[in-house]
Amino acid sequence: MSFVKTQSLHIFKIKEFRWFVLSRFFMTLGVRMQFMTISLQVYDEYAKSEFMLGMIGLTEAVPFIIASFYSGHVADRFPKKRILDFGLFFLLLGATFLCLNSWSSVLLFKNIDGLFLFIIVFLFGIFRAFLAATANPYLSQLVPRNMYLPAATWNSTAWHTGDIVGPVLGGILYGIYGAELCHFTEMIFFSFAFFFMLQIKHKGLPQEQPKKESVFESMKTGLKFVFKTKMLLGVISLDLFAVLFGGAVAIIPAFVDKVLGLGPEAVGLLRTAPAFGAVVCALIMAIYPPSKKAGVTMLWSVIAFGVFTILFGISTNYWLAFAMLFMTGAFDNVSVVVRHSILQLMTPDNMRGRVSAINGIFIGSSNEIGAFESGVAARLLGLVPSIAFGGVMTILTVLGVVKINPELKKLDISKLE
């Protein structure tokens, strides 16, 4: 056990990994705070509509999916470090425009303020597609193969820590000072993320250039690999539908307002509950990695995610709701770490960009489409029933995936290292 602990902490001796994790933390901090601020702005702008909250997710998901078909091709042909640098620069640029547009003395798009927010979200979906196709493959080039699991765990911890602080800070600052200070703070966070990424001098391992082929042929090759690798397809499918139906987090502003009767300050803290749970789970997995029994552990964790989603939906007390969301985040992070580890261990280096892009289409976009599904379901079924429906569908998804691919129960990461 002491060896596992030492191996998990030993990864921080790699300087490039430390810079990467810091950059990932501040990027996530900025992204989550930005999404929270825009959600609150849209919720206020459009008469407190759950449907419009869902539309934010769809507005980001559509360009993300479309751009991902190209981003994976680009990530396997061009230096991944350069793509990350440009992606972070454009996030900083977008935050700057949001900051300027929120100041009454500068207000750039006064008459179309709501539309402007959706335009920024749309553009962010494009940038995120390139970051998603590049970040994890580049991380795998910074650490040795036998440290992919602790790298995925600590990378997930950095992401979820940013996911905790960002929405809390966004909700508090928005409730007290409005959008102006929120967007200014996001701009500072993206500046830090960009700065830390620039400190990494490692340009990545020499890439084996794939044969000359069109973007369509390139992505077709990636899709064939994913669908041929049944274990990889099973893990991605499980995460896809769990996230798709378990997207209750997207309608938290409406839940806090209409069920709990509280203000935007409470939204930020409640929104971070899943991330709090994910960080605690990540720290546990850093010491007790789900390696040999990864498959069984992951399946039961997704079932637990569905159960606690249902319990969140029927909660009428703020701290009970917080506790239920905390548990959803803790159990969800198990599948996140397992999936990221398998992605890197089972994918050839010259295909990691495309496979990561496909994973992004399946998983990354499902967060936003899941937000849209939650918004539509809330309008059709009602707020509380829609959340419970999502939890039930998540549990049924696990049963369906196991029936189709029973080999998932035998998944052992230690045999892949």
Image (cartoon, grey):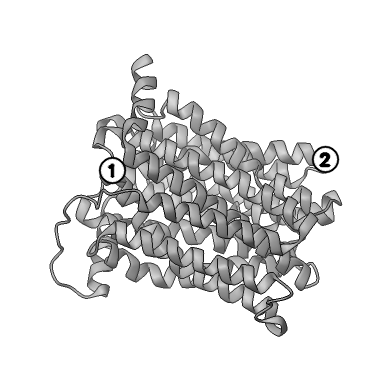
Q: Position of residue 101 (x, y in %)?
A: 65, 74
Q: Please identify, in this view, whether the residue under mark 2 or under mark 1 is nearer the observer.
A: 1
What residue sits 23% from the left and 68% below the top? 218
Residue 416 appears in the figure: no
Vertical side of 26 occupied by 251: above or below? below
Q: Residues within 10 Å of mark 2 (few under 14, many from 20)?
A: few
Q: Give the left or right position of residue 374, taking residue 211 as reference.
A: right
Quarter placement of the N terminus: top left
Q: Which mark is residue 338?
A: none
Q: Quadrant of residue 113?
A: bottom right
The residue pinned by badge 2 equals: 317
Q: Residues within 10 Å of mark 1 (few under 14, many from 20)?
A: many
Name the element at disc 2. loop
Q: Give the left or right position of residue 139, taking residue 121 as reference.
A: left
Q: CA distance from mark 2 to mark 1?
A: 45 Å
The residue pinned by badge 1 equals: 142
Q: Give the left or right position of residue 282, taking residue 108 as reference.
A: left
**400 or 354: which is nearer to us?**
354
Which amino acid does the dot numbered 2 rest on? Answer: Asn
Which amino acid does the dot numbered 1 rest on? Answer: Leu
Residue furthest top as drawn: 2
Residue 205 appears in the figure: yes
What residue sits 23% from the left and 72% below the top? 217
Q: Position of residue 99 (x, y in %)?
A: 63, 67
What residue sits 31% from the left and 35% below the top? 14
Residue furthest front as drawn: 105
Mark 2 or 1, nearer chain start: 1
Quarter placement of the C terminus: top left
**378 or 342: which is nearer to us?**
342
**181 or 291: which is nearer to us?**
181
